[in-house]
Amino acid sequence: MNQPLNKEERARLRRDQIITAARICFRNHGFHGAGMAEIAQMSALSVGQIYRYFTNKDAIIEEIVRRIVETKVNHMQFKKGDLQETAAMLSHRLMAGDPQEQEIDHALMLEVAAEATRNPTVARILREADDKLFGEAMDMLTGIRPDLNQAQLAVWVEFMAVMCEGTAFRRLNHQKANPSLLNTFYLALFTTHLPASEDS
Amino acid sequence: MNQPLNKEERARLRRDQIITAARICFRNHGFHGAGMAEIAQMSALSVGQIYRYFTNKDAIIEEIVRRIVETKVNHMQFKKGDLQETAAMLSHRLMAGDPQEQEIDHALMLEVAAEATRNPTVARILREADDKLFGEAMDMLTGIRPDLNQAQLAVWVEFMAVMCEGTAFRRLNHQKANPSLLNTFYLALFTTHLPASEDS
């Protein structure tokens, strides 16, 4: 028999339920198209219950972004700056993790970016997410390449962030370059400009 | 005294008026937040007059994107693949052209991308815009570097598109890398991997 849930566990479950529903609503109708009533209906809760866990729509967006960042950090730590895998994933426009979830994450981040251009709260959420991801990438690279200084590492992290976000952005278009040639090109680019570490 | 406008000139003027108003409405409230009534009010026309020039909101979006692509193509032809200027602009996250118009263009393209993930018409508009831009970049580079084959050029154009779009996307975040170090890095990256043409 399952133990009955304690208060904390029930709260966590409710929050998960709301986030899952909100992701789908925002994905299908955008932040403006999806209201609290729709999120409540989708999560089989009342609007009042939702407000007990999230003060407003921006708070739900913040939690969604926090979880997306968490996923990205986990994948980053898993890959540990593997240049070969990075080149392969970028050239084939693949994203790490479950494809369907990644597709939703990507659509939601586009929505967040569009909303950030006119909503200061969402702009702050986006900036803080990037600060967190950038910091995690710096920490990871510092561990791998203690011989490089922080300014050099920041240039490399910024370049990689541009490559990842530009590639994700371009997934909406047809790939007009040959992925295998692109892979060779990216790998040459990465290995020439970030020398391999001693032990690799 | 000004000549009275003929029918064609008046139609062009009306379309410009609608596009100018729609850009502001979409910029401020997103595609879903801005209705035809608001666009009509902002452009000092009736809703009926707007429908005479554009069958629906998607048609207005299409014309906005067409004009943004036109601007980008003009800047591309003006810069003629100048790697030094490209590195400088990317590292300082600058965009070509009038800063205020570029800022609106950028916000609108984010909105287009977010909408493209759920609206097939907007997805088609985005893809066609990219096909057009990619083709123009290929033509320009073929003129500059007739020694490279089309597959090599496509790899380079894709890489540059990733760099430009990733950088534009990241303008919403704080720049955490030193722009001058980033400039040096980008220039080295570009000049090492796309050899300079004979006459430059």
Image (spheres, coloured by chain):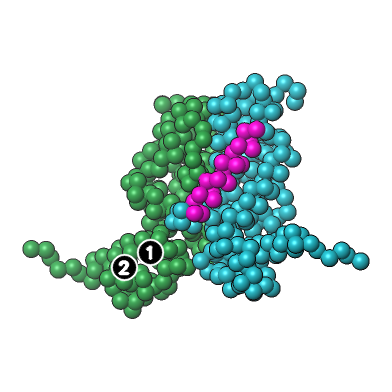
Chain colours: A cyan, B green
Determine whether A166 is above or below B8 in the image.
above
- In the rendered image, residue A176 lying in the magenta stretch gets the answer no
User: For the point 64% across and 43% down, which residue is it?
Assistant: A90
Determine whether B93 is above or below B132 in the image.
above
Q: Quadrant of the C terminus of chain B?
A: top left
The reply to whether callout 2 and callout 1 are in contact (CB within 8 Å) is yes
- Main SS category, magenta section: helix
Q: Tell me where residue A99 appears, x and y as whole percent.
A: 71, 55
Furthest residue in direction right, as rendered: A1
User: For the point 65% across and 33% down, which residue is it?
Assistant: A139
- In the rendered image, residue A132 lying in the magenta stretch gets the answer yes
Q: Nearer the viewer, residue A86 or B84?
A: A86
User: For the point 64% across and 38% down, which residue is it?
Assistant: A136
Chain to which mark 2 belongs = B
On screen, residue A10 versus residue A154, left or right, reads: right
The amino acid beneath tag 1 is Cys
Q: Tell me where residue A72 appears, x and y as whole percent.
A: 66, 46
Furthest residue in direction front, as rendered: A7
Specify the segment rendered in magenta. A121-139
| Residue wearing tag 2 | B42
Q: Nearer the viewer, residue B153 or A98?
A: A98
| Residue wearing tag 1 | B25
Q: Tell me where residue B169 appears, x and y as whole percent.
A: 50, 47
Which label's residue is closer to the chain start, 2 or 1?
1
Q: Quadrant of residue A85?
A: top right
Q: CA distance from mark 2 to mark 1?
A: 8 Å
Q: Quadrant of the N terminus of chain B?
A: bottom left
Chain to which mark 1 belongs = B
The amino acid beneath tag 2 is Met
User: For the point 49% across and 54% down, which residue is it?
Assistant: A121
Q: How many other residues sit within 10 Å of disc 2, few (<14), some (14-19) or many (≥20)?
A: some
